[in-house]
Structure formats: C-alpha cells, structure tokens
Image (spheres, rainbow, N blue to C red):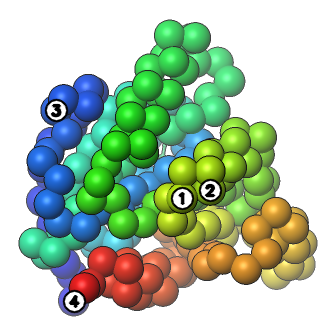
Amino acid sequence: MRPQARFLLSATDERHFPPPGLPEVAFLGRSNVGKSTLLNCLLGRKLARTSNTPGRTQAVNFFEVDGRVIFADLPGYGYAEAPKAVKRGWQGLAESYLLHRESLALCFVLLDARRGWMESDLQLKAWLEAHSRPYAVVAAKSDKLNRKERNESQKAIRGAYPDGDLFWFSGLTGQGVKEIWQTIWKTTTR
Ligand SMILES: Nc1nc2c(ncn2[C@@H]2O[C@H](COP(=O)(O)OP(=O)(O)O)[C@@H](O)[C@H]2O)c(=O)[nH]1
Ligand SMILES: [Mg+2]
C-alpha cells in the first residue's frame, strides 16, 4: 500500500531542521546518483524533486511518512565542477546534520551501480563509521547493468564493504523498493 507522505520543509541551515521526534532515515550520495528518485519510489509519488542538473539541492528536505518516520533528502556531494563555496556549504550542512541529528536512525548511502565506490563515497563511509552512524548501501540505477556487469559491480562494492546490507535499486523497474522498505521498518519500529 502506498504510504501517506507529506513534505515538511526544506532547510538550508541547521537551525531550521524540524525538531527531532520520529525516527529518521537519511539518503546520502553523490549528486545525480538517484537519491530523490529512490525517495519518490519509496513514497510511490513524486514528492522530491529530481533533476538532470547535478549539484542543485543545497538543502536538506524533510518528509514525514505515515506519521511514523521522517525521510531526509540530503544534498549531493562530489560534484567536481561545483564552486568551492558550494562544496563547503555541503560539508557544513551535511556534517552538522550527520553529527548532531539525534533522531537519525539509518543512512542509505547510494552508489552508482556502474561506478561502485568513488573517492567521495569512501570518504563518507569512513566518516559514518568513525562517528558510529549506521548505514546501508544502495547500488542505484541497476537497470543500466546487465547480469555480468552486475556481478562485477557486486564484487567491487563488496571489496570495500564485505557484509553490511546491500540493495540493488532501479527507479525504472522498481527493483529493491520492497527490500529497502523492510529495512526501514525494521530499523525504525521500536
Ligand atoms: N535509468 C535510471 N535513471 C535514474 C535512476 N534513478 C535516477 N535516474 C536519473 O538520474 C538523474 C538524477 O536523479 P535524481 O534522483 O535527481 O538524483 P539525486 O541528485 O541523487 O537526487 C535523473 O535524470 C533521473 O531520472 C534509475 O534507477 N535508473
Ligand atoms: Mg535530489
């Protein structure tokens, strides 16, 4: 069944984050990897804005789902051509979110299934581990790989991430949506 979801607010500053309450799930990854697409697929409708232009979202967008969980769509990182000030802006906002958000229950780190771990993803992963933030990995745009490419990609991703949860996700086919929901409910239901 389609969850009841509503957009809460878009925050460009930590002071504007909604007061922590419901358990929260954050979506992290490089610009254009498919964060907003995953969010929309989970919600069954287009609440989060998707874009062909990388590096646009410089805000944390909050959505309340079924009165039970909050989704946080974080700005993308690793956009090579972004001006330095924009990069610093990402670090400031995302770091303060990840450091201080007490209601944060789980992060999904999205990788482009075709590329696997890139330098900036590995930096984020190390940072999450150093700060004991639980995360799961999503290999996004899985529809762009054939079976052989997917096997190779899986090996490469597992090389740096041997045993945590790994989901294959496609916004085109809906692959992975059910499994990702199961993990969200498992992590946020107390
Ligand atoms: N083929 C394919 N394209 C996707 C998928 N997910 C996202 N895209 C496309 O990738 C672009 C960026 O997606 P978006 O969700 O805005 O990425 P974000 O910047 O991480 O939020 C858009 O043009 C999407 O249509 C997917 O699973 N398969
Ligand atoms: Mg987005």
Marks 1 and 3, how far apart in space? 24 Å
Pick the front one: 11 or 177: 11
Residue at the (17%, 66%) spot, across then down? 22
Q: Which residue is mark 2?
A: 129
Left/right of residue 127 with respect to residue 8 in the rendered view: right
What type is the residue that disc 3 sits on?
A: His
Pick the front one: 43 or 71: 71
Residue at the (12%, 47%) spot, across then down? 19
Mark 1 nearby-residue class (10 Å; few <14, some 14–19, many ≥20): few
- Closer mark to the observer between disc 1 and disc 3: 1
Q: Which circle's residue, 1 or 3, is located before the other in the chain?
A: 3
Mark linked to residue 150: none
SS assignment at label 3: helix
Q: Which residue is mark 1?
A: 132
Q: Which residue is mark 4?
A: 1
- Closer mark to the observer between disc 4 and disc 2: 2
Which image quadrant is residue 100 in? top left
State whether residue 108 appears in this view: no
Mark 2 nearby-residue class (10 Å; few <14, some 14–19, many ≥20): few
Residue at the (38%, 34%) spot, across then down? 96
- Closer mark to the observer between disc 4 and disc 3: 3
What type is the residue that disc 1 sits on?
A: Ser
Left/right of residue 171 with respect to residue 41 in the rendered view: right
